[in-house]
Amino acid sequence: MENTRRGVHIAFEGIDGSGLTTHSRRLVDELSNMGYKSEYFKEPTKGPIGDLIRSFLRGDDRVRHDLLALLFAADRLWNYHASTKPIALLKEQGYIVVSDRYKYSSAAYQGAFTDLEWVWIINSRVPHADIIVYLDVPVDVALRRIELRSKNGVAREHYEKAELLEKIRRNYEVVLRKAEEEGVVVIKISGVDSGGERSIDEVAREIKEKIVDFITSRR
């Protein structure tokens, strides 16, 4: 398959434990196998600001969320325009850029502790993604996955608590609506069905089909 003529920016969003890293990485692999130029990014980045953010996220409850929001916005701006492989340049070169979290995470997460509209404004210096893939899972399912992950040696972070995730999940409803109003395409993918949790393969198949349809429509 030929590469896209125009770059596309895809942002994966959802609460912790929703499967963002699994599915964003898998989509990049599948798109690459189909012949698309694609690149994966994870937030916070591995740049100097991203390292500072991670130290806060693994800290205690005294973290200043307005400071954290500013750091995320700065890290994102650096990654979009000034890193060694900036998203802006990749889009110009026709890449499909897949972000494992983007500015919508900041609005949902830091917006749970400080003014959501302010977080939205400080992130306005980076463009919207073209499409958001929102992985929707109930908080109890997310927490089970987080607990399993922690047993495998992955450190838990500040936000991985039931009451916080419930509030963040509600915030996402506001954030996704605002993004749609500003022209972003939002696709919601449920991680569960009437039989319980859906398999990784089943969810990945749905994501791939919808993303390929979107890319094709933009050519």
Image: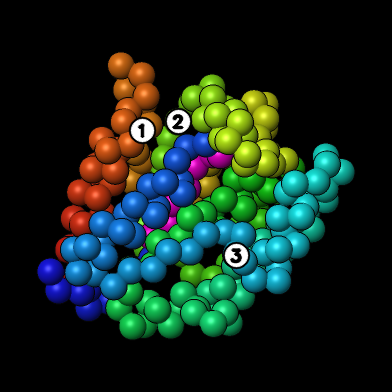
Of helix, strand and loop, which one carries label 1?
A: strand
Residue depicted at 25% across the width and 35% down the height: 202
Q: Is residue 201 above or below residue 186?
A: above
Alpha carbon separation for disc pair 3 and 2: 25 Å
Query: Which mark is on residue 190?
Result: 1
Q: Which residue is mark 3?
A: 45
Residue depicted at 43% across the width and 51% down the height: 12
**Where does the C terminus fall, quadrant-wise?**
bottom left
Residue depicted at 58% across the width and 82% down the height: 82
The residue type indicated by label 3 comes to Thr
Residue depicted at 83% across the width and 41% down the height: 60
Given residues 68 and 180, the one toward you in this image is: 68
Query: Which mark is on residue 137?
Result: 2
- 3 or 2: tag closer to the N-terminus: 3
User: What stretch of residues is rendered in magenta?
Assistant: 10-16
Q: Are marks 1 and 2 in contact (CB under 8 Å)?
A: yes
Residue most extreme to the top: 195
- In reply to whether residue 86 is colored magenta, the answer given is no
Question: What's the image's color scheme?
Answer: rainbow
The residue type indicated by label 2 comes to Val
Residue 213, quarter of the rendered image: bottom left
Q: Position of residue 167 (x, y in %)?
A: 63, 32
The residue type indicated by label 1 comes to Ser
The nearer-to-camera label among 3 and 1 is 3
Q: Is residue 118 above or below residue 39?
A: above
